[in-house]
Image (cartoon, rainbow, N blue to C red):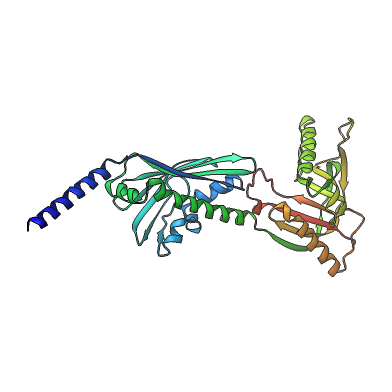
Amino acid sequence: MKVLKYIVLILLILFIGSSTYVAVQPSAYDVSRTRTIEAPSEVIYNEIIDFKNWSDWSPWVEKDPTLTFTYPEQTRGVDGSYSWEGKDGKGSMKTLAAVDNDSIWQELKFENFPPTNVYWKLNKNGQHTDVNWGMTSEEMGFIMKFFALISGGIDNMIGPDYERGLEKLDSLIVKKISEYSITVDGIKEYGGGFYLYKTTNATNANISSTMAKQYGSIGAYMAKNQIAMHGMPFTIYQEMNMEEGTVIMSNGIPVSQKIDITDDSGILCGFIPKTKVLKTTLKGNYTNLSEGWKQAMEYAAKNNLTQSEFKPFEIYTNDPGQVPNPADWITEIYIPITE
C-alpha cells in the first residue's frame, strides 16, 4: 500500500507541476501568415469580406468535411457574421471593422474559449497583393495553452492552417479572375460618330502599355481643351497580323462633334459612319481578345460575310479602374461588313 501511495503522490506532484508549467505559459499571442496573390486587392477584399465565400477556401472544411454552416441575413461587411458546427464543436465569427480593399478586423468565438481577434491586411504590390491573415489575443485559456504546448507552440498549432487557407484562397482567386466567355452576337448596326485618335504600332508584348500611353495622351488633350467624352475608348486595327502578333492601331475616344486640331499634338479627329457590323462580345481579361477575334473571323468566313472598306475595331465598354476583376471586363469586337 505504501508503494501505491508513493506512486499516487508522485503522479499528483507531476500533475501539479505540469499544470503549473502550462499555466505560466504566455497568455498573449499573435500568429499570422502572408502570401502574395497575383490579383488586385479589390478582388481579394470582395472575396474575404463575405463569410458565404469562406467555405470555398477554408482549410478547416478540408480537415473536417462534416462542417455545417449557418448564415444570418447579413454575412458581408461590418456586422456580417456566420456560425458553424463540426466534429470539434461549435463556433462563430463576426466582422467588427473594415477599410475597403485594405484591412478587416473580426472576432472569433469557439466553444467556451475566450474570444480571439482575427485580422486581414492587404498591401498592394504593383499588380499583386500581399495578403496578411492572422489571429491575436491577450488571453489564452489553460486548455488552449495545453494544446499549444503539445503542438510545439501556438504558431505551430495555428500557422499551418492559415498558410493552407491562403494557398487555397490564392488558387480560387486566380481561377475566378481568369474566367472568360465569348459570344458571337451576329449582325448589328453600329451608330458611328466622331472621335479623337492617335495611330501607332505595337506587339503582343507591349500593346497594353502602348494603349495606356495613347489614351493618356488623348485624355490629357481633351482635359486641356475641355472636350467631353461621348462614349467609351476603342481601338481601330489598321493592320493586324495574328501570326506574328503585331498590329498597327488607332486608339480613339468618341466625341460629340468634329474637332479641329490646330497644334502638333499628333492627335487627329476621325469619323466612323453608321454601318453594318458583325458583333462579338468578350467578357473577361483582354488577354483573351485574340481568341475573341479568332471566333469572330471564323464566324464571318463560315457565314460568307464580306468585310467592308472600314477597318475592324473593338470597344472597351467598362473601365478597369472601376471594375477591378478582369473576369468582368467587357469588350465588344466589331467587323464592318458589306450590305
Residue drawn 53% across the image and 40% down it: 102
Quadrant hosting residue 27: top left
Residue drawn 63% across the image and 47% down it: 324
Q: Residue furthest left?
A: 1
For the N terminus, the image quarter is bottom left
Residue 260 on image: x %, y %: 88, 35
Quadrant hosting residue 280: bottom right
Q: Residue furthest front?
A: 3
- 72 with respect to 240 (left or right): left
Q: Residue furthest right?
A: 309
Above or below, 304 relative to 318: below
Above or below, 287 relative to 195: below
Residue 217 on image: x %, y %: 79, 35
- 317 with respect to 44 (left or right): right
Residue 235 on image: x %, y %: 81, 48
Quadrant hosting residue 141: top left
